[in-house]
Image: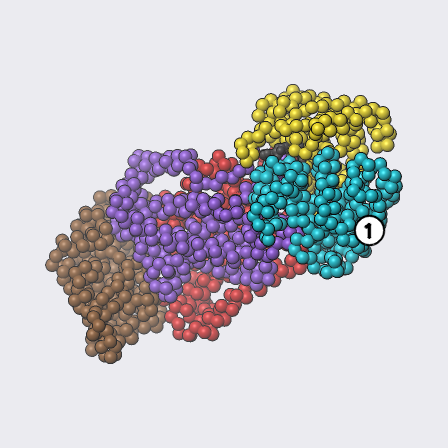
Chain colours: A brown, B red, C purple, D yellow, E cyan
Amino acid sequence: GSDSTADDGNSGPLKIRVAYGPGFGSLPVVIAAEKGYFKANGLDVTLTEGLDLAAYLGALGAQFDVVMGLPPGILQASGRGVALTVISGLNRTDAAHVNNPVLTKDATIKSAADLAGKTVGVPTLTGISADAVRYVVRQQTGKDVKLVQVPPDAMADQITAGRIDAAVSAIPYFTGVESRGIRVLDDVVIQAVKLATGNKDDSALLGAFIATPSYVDKHPEVATAWRKSLQQGADFIAANEKEARAILQQHAKLPAAVAANAPLPNFVATTSAADFQPFVTIGETIGSLRKTPDLGTLIHQEK
Amino acid sequence: MTTAVPRRQSRVRGAFVFGLLPLAVLLGCWQFFVPADSRAFPPPSTWPGALAELSAEGSLIPAVRTTLVTFLLALAVATVLGTALGMLIGSSRRLERPLTPVMDFFRTLPPPAMVPVLALLLGTNTSMAVTVVVLASLWPILLNTASERRNVPPVRMEMARSLGLRWSERVFKVLLPSLAPGIMLGVRVAVSIALIVTLLVDILGTGEGIGRELMLGQQSFKPATVWALLLVIGVFGYLLNGAVAAAENRLMRKWGRRR
Amino acid sequence: MTRTHSLPGAANPVGVAVVVVAIVMWQLLVALRILDYSFLPSAGDVGGALWQLARSGELLDSVGHTLLVTLVASAIAIVIGVAAGLALGMLPLVHTFSMASVDFFRTLPVTAMIPAILLVWGPTAEAEIIAATYAAAWQIVVNTTGGVRATHPRLLDVARTFGLTREQTVRKIVLPAAMPAILVGARLAIVSALVVAIVAEMLINPAGLGWGLVQGQQALQPGVTWAYAVTAGILGYLLNAGLMWAARRMPGGRVPSSSGTSAA
Amino acid sequence: MSVELMSADGPRQILRDVNFTVGAGEIVGIVGRSGTGKTTLLRVLGGMVRASSGLVELHGRADNLPGTVVTVFQDYGNALLPWRSVARNVSLGIERGLGRAEREQRVADVLRLVGLEGRSSDHPWQLSGGMQQRVQIARALAVEPRVLLMDEPFGALDAITKATLQDVLLRIQAQTGATTIFITHDIDEAIYLSDRVFVIAGSPGSLIVQEPVDLPRPRTQLETREHPRYLSVRHALAEALREETA
Amino acid sequence: MSVELMSADGPRQILRDVNFTVGAGEIVGIVGRSGTGKTTLLRVLGGMVRASSGLVELHGRADNLPGTVVTVFQDYGNALLPWRSVARNVSLGIERGLGRAEREQRVADVLRLVGLEGRSSDHPWQLSGGMQQRVQIARALAVEPRVLLMDEPFGALDAITKATLQDVLLRIQAQTGATTIFITHDIDEAIYLSDRVFVIAGSPGSLIVQEPVDLPRPRTQLETREHPRYLSVRHALAEALREETA
Ligand SMILES: Nc1ncnc2c1ncn2[C@@H]1O[C@H](COP(=O)(O)OP(=O)(O)OP(=O)(O)O)[C@@H](O)[C@H]1O
Ligand SMILES: Nc1ncnc2c1ncn2[C@@H]1O[C@H](COP(=O)(O)OP(=O)(O)OP(=O)(O)O)[C@@H](O)[C@H]1O
Ligand SMILES: [Mg+2]
Ligand SMILES: [Mg+2]
């Protein structure tokens, strides 16, 4: 594919179409666009923001060149034979960067394991949080948990109204819920990853970007440039948190208090097969992953 | 309109089967012209397998049951409520004018936006699901009934009053049968809306039922499952509408309205 | 007894009063903490958010986008739907060989097809229009078919005796006779188009009211979310009123107020 | 009493200062040109239209007991229920109160009276115009009303059926003593049946003549019409109707 | 020609072996008891019902040119378009071909003929029964048909309006030479208007009498009815109708 690079390479930056989900997690993308990192790295990026990541993944290679994905979804798609390559990571959760805590008012619930038999709200029925809760409960109690889809912003209300026993929240929706008498428990995804790796790992990849292998073959520079841009974005956030938060506030139209105080995830643009291994274990255990993809070829290797 | 009665009957039955011709043609073209490894449009021959897989997991039957219960309950409530309200609104300008803006407003609230609110107020249970579905599928029945009500010849109601029929008799013996064609039309439209919204509530609200399987299929990249489920839903809609259409046909024949 | 049927949409003080009462009730329920949810803001908060959005011009942009999509989709749906409904209602052969398929296709949830639509048309306004048109057209098809088939046989005798051509019969007899049913279909269709456009905006094409709703959610600003939802409702009402207004002004297409005869 | 209805250009007065009293058991025929307000008058009497001034009293009461005043409508096409068979259309007014057997008997009886005994399971749209009108008459007779209002009841019938039904009406009325008010365009019919004939004329319509018909009862189609008083009443009515036109 | 229609219990023969020829410009009145198939016959002639055996030819052709054969229906209540004003109902058949001014002129003319000149902007449900029927007649006259079929056209009208419209019909027919076939329950009307009177009788109905009425034209309400031939025709027809009952 070096000939095709020559095509576009001479005539300015490469046009790529990217789709991603909105929110705190994708801040580096916003920053990279805002600060011109994409352009500086030779990419002319058209961004599409939207909720249905699965639909975006389905349109990969047709309507989009690069899309955001969450590890369980990426593994499932790959296992189903969708040709894809992970070209970058995005954000991570760890003890210092709690992303998906369990919220509850129920005094009997002390940890995720106590959710057995309870009704638990999750942002989407197939996402990371759903898989994690189900896995933790299954591993620790052998029982099941009833999951219902609740928009994250309505979780606190649903708990208060007694409609659900607990919920798995996400940044920034658990900011300030303590004032309403809701307890914020541990991050259930970290817990699941710990269980899945026998406590070897206590941090998890939350988001990544993928492209089709043929696209990466044709434009080998894209993966590198994309990763570099995101890393620059992450670095900028680390160095200029205030400004980054201001940009986020501007972009997502957040109230000042939320933008200033909500915790930020840990942004890391690189990733490896090891990041996906816990999710393979989780997926296989709870039955959401039927065919295990080849992790060796899943991650883009720079040639 | 003369000797058509026996033919009419067979026409109805014929329509029930032959009416699937366009669908069959579409599926045939799909099977033969879309590449077998298409990611978004897997050929129909792969669908039964996907369905069998789902059924083997034991999730198909309970899902169908959940969806059916919500759907049928909601459709029944919507029919009764829509008919009653439509009758009121259609018979009185004094009621119609003040209610129209509110109704048009609520009609437009997208069900996905209603689900969280009603989940808050009612909980994520069947009654919430039924409420959402009723709120979405009520309108065709209500509007069609109201429109039909305005078209009932005044002589007919005067006749009923003149014969000394009681209020309940006037409603059940004269008014309701007069409105039946409109109600039927409304139900036919409502059936599909109710089914679609039931699936939506499966996803957003109760997290059970065919809607959930559909979304799981979609999010875990099993397009064959998705299309197979759509086929199941479509067939269900087709059977249900066939039943409504048969009832409607019988009715219209009695009315002497069918050509 | 007057049977002149003036349609809603004209100045309607009572209707407005009911809306005002509803808003006041809402405000009271929240103020008295009977409804005490952060997710359910008070009418005042929503009004404030609405005002903010209006001032910044965001509201106008969103409304403009969604309105355009809805109008285009509704117009296409009405044209296609009425034509198909006439064919299904008047031609027994067409009815026999496709009504069951119509019943099949119109039960398919658009939301499930949105990914497929995205794949073909991309995250664009066209994709939204396609989805909205798909959802809206069926309602008109079914209502038109029903209305046409319920036309009183004597009216068709009249058409025949005056030697009206097929086209004239449709235009002068069948369409006006079915008009009440078609109008109901159109009212349902416009709302469907609007709702599906909003859902498509939430899922695949970030623009318009749907995306505004999502952003409100993402931004922990229920006021904004509700401001967009309320705007959607108002838009629905106005679209309806506009439709009825247009129907009354259609050339030669006075909405029949009574299919029956004189009470005289 | 006066009546106004809405028309394209504002309210239009239909009836002006129509005042009369009908005795219990009396038969009154109303004649008058097309559009003078005869149907409207009957609608006021039947409680279907409110008079803009004045009131209607039945036995000194302003409200009707259900089933006591029954109307046979001019527009039979819309007054029958298309989804009910002939028999079930006729039984509509007597389904409450009456036992099943008695009801079926009564339906069979009135259908025989109007000559439709063989058609009880047909639907209205399978009947000829005249038959539909007869179904309507049978339905009214079935409830045995105290006051019977009829709008051109025999207009759609041939001479023989008409004569038969006229005599049926007279016989039943003599049995039940029902007060009967009917509209007709046939002066002969009006005289043959009535105790008094009213002429409505003008626009807005007013009651210009209340002609007593003091012919002996029981009446017969042949003898009554040859009675000298018959001819003089006929003359007076024809005069009144003609004058109005001139 | 014979006709069968479906009833509750299988096909029922309505008309049997009805055969006749009507000359161009002729006026034929059809009389007969209620339910003998007169309306059905007219529907066959108007092409609304297909005969189960036999055929209808117009000037030697089996298919009608549009607008040449026009029917006035018995149930005026269902035959008028409720969403159109009186004037627009009347113009229904002449909206093609005719210029706007000429059309409006013609509508005004026929409305004047039937005495409804002031009601052109009203809607059908604002009219009395007789007025609605007149609108239907005006609508048929407006197209100036070559064959005019009328089902009890003057049944809902009072004597004076009826006489007026009868003369209007005769005058127009004389001008246009339209072949006219009408159903009536009024023997006098049948004779006064027709060149021949048909009697349909029995069940299934058959054509039992075709009585020529060789009265001179133009006819007038007073003179014609005193003509000796008038009385003899009337006698013959009354006989035929009575016999059938016996
Ligand atoms: N609903 C209505 N709205 C307005 N005007 C009406 C209405 N009903 C009747 N009219 C008018 O009232 C007048 C009297 O009508 P009505 O039906 O009482 O006449 P009628 O004497 O019964 O005539 P006919 O013998 O032709 O039936 C007519 O001019 C008619 O147009
Ligand atoms: N659509 C139909 N289906 C079945 N039978 C019918 C239908 N229309 C009419 N008939 C029957 O055909 C016979 C003749 O009806 P038709 O209407 O021709 O009578 P008619 O001579 O016009 O009577 P009238 O003077 O009462 O109007 C009747 O017995 C009637 O019940
Ligand atoms: Mg009248
Ligand atoms: Mg007839």
- Farthest residue, direction left: A239
- Tell me the quadrant of the picture where the C terminus of chain B can be found: bottom right
Image position, residue C33 (x, y; %): 30, 37
Question: Residue at image x 58%, y 38%?
Answer: E122
**Image coordinates for residue C137, horizontal then vertical, percent:** 47, 56
Q: Nearer the viewer, residue B149 or D209?
A: D209
The structure residue drawn at horizontal position 21% and vertical position 59%, both measured from the top left corner, is A30
Give the vertical position of B229 relative to C216 (above or below): below
Q: Residues within 10 Å of mark 1 (few under 14, many from 20)?
A: some
Q: Is residue C5 above or below residue A42?
A: above
Res. E128 image quadrant: top right
Residue B125 makes an appearance in the image: no
Q: Chain of mark 1?
A: E
Residue at point 45%, 46% (across, down): C246
Q: Residue at x 23, y 73 (%)?
A: A8
Q: Is residue E64 left or right of residue B52?
A: right
In the drawing, does residue B38 fall left or right of residue D149? left
Look at the image and tell me in which quarter the N terminus of chain B lies.
bottom right
Q: Please tell me whether residue B10 is drawn above or below residue D214 in the rendered image.
A: below
B58 vs A15, left or right, is right
Q: What's the residue type where badge 1 is placed?
A: Leu
- What residue would you read off at disc 1? E207
Q: Is residue C105 left or right of residue E112?
A: left
Q: Can residue C59 be seen by looking at this rendering?
A: yes
Where does residue A222 sit, x and y in percent of width and height? 22, 71
Task: Choose between D101 and A6: the one closer to the eye.
Answer: A6
Label 1: element kind:
strand
x%, y% of residue E12?
Answer: 76, 53
Count how many numbered circles sit on residues in the image.
Answer: 1
